[in-house]
Image (cartoon, rainbow, N blue to C red):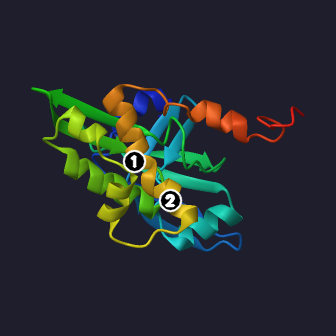
Amino acid sequence: MSLGLEQLTPCFQGILPAQLFTCSLDGIPNAAYLSHVEYVDGDHVALSFQFFNKSRRNVAENPNALVLVPDPDTGQGWLLRLRFVRSETEGALFDRMALRIEDDRVADVRFNGKGCAISQASASILTEEIKGKTLDEIKAIDRDHILENLGIPISPARIKCALLSLKTLKGAAWGLPAWPGEDEAKERARPGKGDSNGS
């Protein structure tokens, strides 16, 4: 029996881990567990990129993979034949966080991310910390607070990873689809834009 991805939505809730099967270019197979497989659209899923180096090497050499997603309601497993298209470290797919507010306080918070270990650790620490806080307390959390919570040195190249959860959280707290001024800053950073000489 064959089903479309949209018919397998219970399998993408992250309740039961999925299994990823890859193969190197010379035919050596590897199996690993995935914490989450995310439904993107009728033709695409996103995989949590937290698998081991062997799986990463295999996908780099051979973009074809097989993923077993279990249905948590029936226990039936479904095989997805996948072809790696690209990696994402930011954007709408990556930046999903939901807040449930009761009596002006965070009653529950959940995040769904597909990033590096630093971004995932930052999000995990932050979501635990904000439970029970008011929106005003959340809005007061800043960059320094996040970096201090991580408790490890963060290189300049990884600051963006460490702060992604803060950006996503503040967007959720204010109900914003994007960080204020982000689009304008990206536009100014493009070559030929925002030059003071008018060129």
Give residue 65's position: percent from left, percent from top. Answer: 58, 55
Q: Residue at x 57, y 37 (%)?
A: 44
Q: Residue at x 52, y 54 (%)?
A: 160
Residue, x 54% and y 45% (percent of image)?
90
- The secondary structure type at the circle numbered 1 is helix
Across and down, in percent, residue 102 comes to: 12, 27
Q: Quadrant of residue 131?
A: top left
Q: Residue furthest front?
A: 197
Judged left or right of residue 137, residue 116 is right
Answer above or below: position of 41 versus 120: above
Q: Are the residues at dot 1 and dot 2 in contact (C-beta closer than 8 Å)?
A: no
Q: Tell which circle, 1 or 2, labels the residue nearer the N-terminal end.
A: 2
Which SS class for mark 2?
A: helix
Q: Can you tell which mark lies on residue 159?
A: 2
User: What residue is pinned by disc 1?
Assistant: 165
What is the three-letter code of the residue carrying label 2? Ile
Residue projecting furthest to the right: 199
Choose top left, top right, bottom left or bottom right for residue 103.
top left
Is 13 located above or below residue 142 in the figure?
above
Residue 142 shown left or right of residue 155 in the figure: left
Q: In front here: 24 or 99?
A: 99
Tell me if residue 77 can be seen. no
- State which quarter of the image contains the C terminus: top right
Say if 3 sits above or below 64 in the image. Answer: above
In the rendered view, does 114 fall on the left or right side of 138?
right
Viewer-closest of 1 and 130: 130
- Packing grade of label 2 (10 A; few <14, some 14-19, many >=20) is some
Q: Which x, y percent locates residue 4?
A: 50, 29
The Cα atoms of the two marked residues, 1 and 2, are separated by 11 Å
Look at the image and tell me whether residue 180 can be seen. yes
